[in-house]
Image (spheres, rainbow, N blue to C red):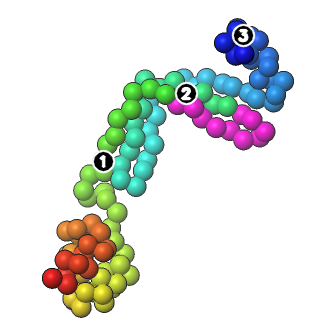
Amino acid sequence: MFNMMDSRQLSKMMKQLGMQQEQIESEEVIIKTAGGEIVISEPQVMKIKVGGQETFQISGEISEREKPAEQKEKFSEEDAKLVAQQSGAGLDEARKALEETGDIAEAIMKLKK
């Protein structure tokens, strides 16, 4: 059905359904994640409003960047205490194991050996 409509007909139909669509000129879109960033180069960004809610549709060339090691999330003091308690190691050893492994369960297993 949509294949036979020209862009004006499609826009008119969307408007009747309460949908608004707007193209947003963009050079780059960056989505920050816990482990780094998703970078979309040469993006085509559409903002779509339906029922008072806005959504974005993004397409383009996708690449990923990891966070540099110094920016990775640090473990909390509670995490270090948990590793120390579960492994029987000291708090300093628990912190070191957390930094080396990057994972609570792995740090506990490493210290139990």
Q: Residue at x 70, y 9 (%)?
A: 4
Residue depicted at x 67% and y 31%: 48
Disc on res. 113: none
Residue 12 visible, this orientation:
yes
Label total for image: 3
The numbered dot on residue 5 is 3
Disc on the earlier residue, 2 or 3? 3
List the residue tagged with mark 1.
Answer: 66
Q: Quadrant of the C terminus?
A: bottom left
Name the residue furthest left: 113
Q: Does dot 3 land on a helix, a strand or a loop?
A: loop
Q: Position of residue 82 (x, y in %)?
A: 34, 84
On the question of residue 26 being in view, the answer is no
| Residue 45's disc number | 2
> Quadrant of residue 99 in the image?
bottom left
* 22 is within the stretch colored magenta: no
Q: Tell me the quarter of the picture where residue 47 sits.
A: top right
| Picture residue at 74% right of the left edge, 27% below the top | 20
Q: Nearer the viewer, residue 16 or 27?
A: 16
Image marks 2 and 1: residues in contact by CB distance under 8 Å: no
Amino acid type indicated by mark 2: Val
Query: Residue 33: x and y, percent?
Result: 42, 50
> Looking at the rendering, in which quadrant would you find the N terminus?
top right
**Amino acid marked by disc 3:** Met
Q: Main secondary structure of the magenta part?
A: strand
- How far apart marks 1 and 3 lie (CA) works out to 43 Å
Magenta stretch: give its range.
Answer: 49-58
Give the distance between the C-alpha atoms of the residues marked 2 and 1, in whole angstroms: 24 Å
Circle nearer the viewer, 1 or 3: 3
